[in-house]
Image: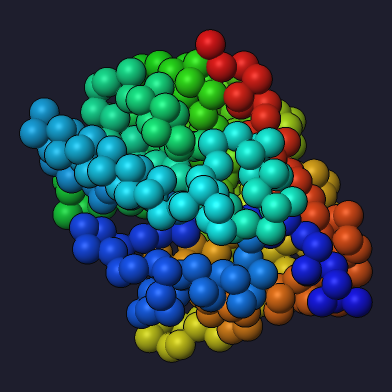
Amino acid sequence: MPADIHATTLTLDSHIDIRWPEPPDPLAEGPMRVDFPKMQRGGLRAAVFIAYVGQGKRDAAGHAAAAERVDAMLRHIQGRADGEARRFCTTPDELEAAHAAGALAVLSAVENGYAMGHDLGAPARWRALGACYLTLTHDGHNDLADSARPQARLGDTPEEHGGLSALGRQAVGALNDAGMLVDVSHVAKSGMLQAAALSRSPIVATHTACRALCDHPRGIDDEQLDALKAVGGLAQITAMPSFLKKVPEGQRNPAGVEDMVDHVDHAVRRIGLEHVGLSSDFDGGGAVEGWQNPAETPNLTAALIKRGYGAREIGLLWSGNFLRLWRQAQAIAR
């Protein structure tokens, strides 16, 4: 039964944004798509909450402000856990133990390497605060890498570094040393392929989709999917309607859980089940018909079951594949 499979699966959403600097109380049902009551109601057992910074001025003051914001957000995310009903998890073993105990798992990550500035010690600091990955860029180039979506308002040219900069290559090494995953969501194709070749642990795209089905610059094409498979990496299909389905400009996008599963199916057929996962990008723009918030999480599991995925496959899609990569990243830490 779908309900039985969902109830026993360790469901992990690998990318959820939070409002900052005045986040609402996550213990109460509130205005955000994600809070702990909705997670509990929908059986979403674990979430990676994001310390996000938008792309800003690339100078010492801008980098310092971004670093300060990220550190504060990481501490706030850690503080959302009480050690009992909600556990802050910094390793795969801690996550599995939280699930076994019936607790919700709280994880953290950093989005946009802009917050690193030129400080190659930042990944070790973020790891010490519990972060499990860094998304190298956001919208707009930074000093590490070209973005998949250059921003004219920031003065971006279509390409600045030809993928990763020299500093970006060093940053990948620093992430490997710290035991953090390298997230290539938002990164230009050139930089994504370079990161795949360079990283000593498999890379992940924590919130993406398949350009073969919807040609959006934030998706990844079949060549990129093949590169993920070649290095043991992972594509986490996300609930962003514009990544999943093309509609005429100005029209409401009707993408739903079935469209998400279309992208899952394509990636699984192309590179294999072990290289595909799931995420929402809730409170960062993500939400599709049938999965508007964590309370509706059973609908996505049911859609996967309808397509023929069984309990083992659903376990890998929801968390097993991500846990494998996270373990590999931590195993090579220095």
Question: Does residue 99 sit above or below 324 in this rendering?
Answer: below
Observer-nearest residue: 173 or 32? 32
The image quadrant that residue 135 belongs to is top left
Question: Does residue 237 sit above or below 253 in this rendering?
Answer: above
Total labels drawn: 0
**Residue furthest bottom in the image:** 251
Q: Is residue 220 left or right of residue 318?
A: left
Question: Does residue 31 sit above or below 199 in this rendering?
Answer: below
**Residue furthest front in the image:** 84
Q: Position of residue 235 (x, y in %)?
A: 64, 48
Q: Position of residue 63 (x, y in %)?
A: 18, 33
Q: Residue at x 34, y 68 (%)?
A: 25
**Residue furthest left in the image:** 61
Q: Is residue 21 left or right of residue 26?
A: left
Q: Residue at x 70, y 53 (%)?
A: 101
Whether residue 93 is visible to the viewer of this picture, yes or no, is: yes
Q: Residue at x 80, y 55 (%)?
A: 315
Whether residue 47 is visible to the viewer of this picture, yes or no, is: no
**Residue furthest top in the image:** 334
The quadrant of the rendering that contains the N terminus is bottom right
Q: Is residue 122 left or right of residue 201?
A: left
The image quadrant that residue 181 belongs to is top right
Q: Position of residue 221 (x, y in %)?
A: 62, 50
